[in-house]
Image (cartoon, rainbow, N blue to C red):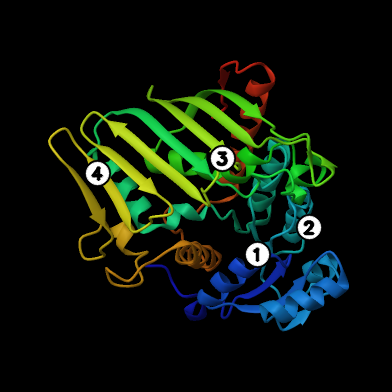
Amino acid sequence: MTTDVTDTGLGMIRAGILGGGFMARVHRTASRDAGAELRAVATSSASGGRIAALALGAERAEADSEALLDAADIDVVHICTPNATHADLALRAFAAGKHVVCEKPLATTASDAKRLVDAAAEHGLVGAVPFVYRYHPMVREARSRMQRGDVGELLTLDCSYLQDWMLLPSDDDWRVQASSGGASRAFADIGSHLCDLIEFVIGERIRALSARTRRVFAERAGRAVDTEDIVAVLIETQSGALGTLLISQMAAGRKNALTLELHGSKQSLRFEQERPEELWVGSRAQSQLLLRDPSTADADSARLQRVPAGHAMGYQDAFNGFMADVYAAIAGEEPEGLPTFADGHRAAVLTEAVLDSAAHDGRWMEVSQ
């Protein structure tokens, strides 16, 4: 079990949040659940910061990011701002002696992400990225079954992450433009989650890939679009398993459908994020639907199960589990499976490989390990 931060020699962890949108609210809830105090919030404007501080229940609003990063009463900074700002803010937070939880993508280039990995090590501080789907208990159950050899040799993967929030030409967001969101939208935003989950569960890396991308609308709400809506990827893992990945933000009716299906020489496993209490286990003789139950789960899965079987757990619970591990790491522990800035860098490497392959008509690309 992870240690509650209020019981550590460090005392109460004091948090600051940069940003005031949906993800800031999720971070706030998880931070408080882990026992921290939300000292301050800052957004892109002083007035916005005041509104966000009131909405999030922070002790105060800071005028800007510089004031929050310089504050002496903040131990960890949560970065929930547009993608293009992540690298600079995280570097400044480390320089100010603060631990960092940064939304993904960690940076808009792999080189910037590597700088952040190095900076965390140089300053001896925790840098974490919320690849929180790792924290669904049934994901940990699938990972444990892979590690035990229940699945046998991994043969193929059939995985996807589908949403529909950008289905219409009137659907708009700051992410559609590379200047604020980075060169990739769909893959960097949700494909990164999918690939992180794949590599985490199977215990090996994607060795090579071939990708195609599609931008459906040249404009959204009257603004030019220079990022992709849809990505299709063929992958080969280090062990030779072959897989297909489909990432789309234009799949009508799909709200947050992350699906991981793994086919082995003995068993198949299927996890659906929208049905997080379940793990489908298939074999030649029979198939079964395994329901979350801490009394029968693997230890790594059971430690994340805060409530008995039959009491549904979901996305915020996964985020809360992630945050508890972040704060435990700040207290000196080494939580199993915590996604760090190294994992954020890995996602940036995969993103650049996908864009490079797509720019060369789907040419197979070796992915640096």
| 195 and 39: which is toward the camera | 195
* Real-space CA distance between mark 1 and mark 2, rounded to the nearest whole angstrom: 23 Å
Q: Amino acid at mark 2?
A: Arg
| 4 and 312: which is toward the camera | 312
Residue occupying image coordinates x 69% and y 33%: 216
* Residue 90 in the figure: left or right of residue 198: right
Q: Amino acid at mark 4?
A: Val
Q: Secondary structure at mark 1?
A: helix
Task: Tell me if label 4 and label 3 are in contact, CB under 8 Å.
Answer: no
Q: Which residue is mark 3?
A: 191
- Within 10 Å of disc 4 (Cα), the crowding (few <14, some 14-19, many 20+) is many
> Can residue 275 be spotted in the picture?
yes
Q: Which residue is mark 4?
A: 281
* Residue 223 in the figure: left or right of residue 329: right
* Location of residue 83 with respect to 1 vertically, above or below: above
Q: Percent x, y for residue 134?
A: 44, 52
Q: Secondary structure at mark 2?
A: helix
- Within 10 Å of disc 2 (Cα), the crowding (few <14, some 14-19, many 20+) is some
Q: Amino acid at mark 3?
A: Gly
* Residue 230 in the figure: left or right of residue 284: right
Residue occupying image coordinates x 66% and y 66%: 24
* Real-space CA distance between mark 4 and mark 3, rounded to the nearest whole angstrom: 24 Å
* Real-space CA distance between mark 1 and mark 4, rounded to the nearest whole angstrom: 34 Å
Q: Which residue is mark 1?
A: 22
Give the mark toward the camera: 2 or 4: 4
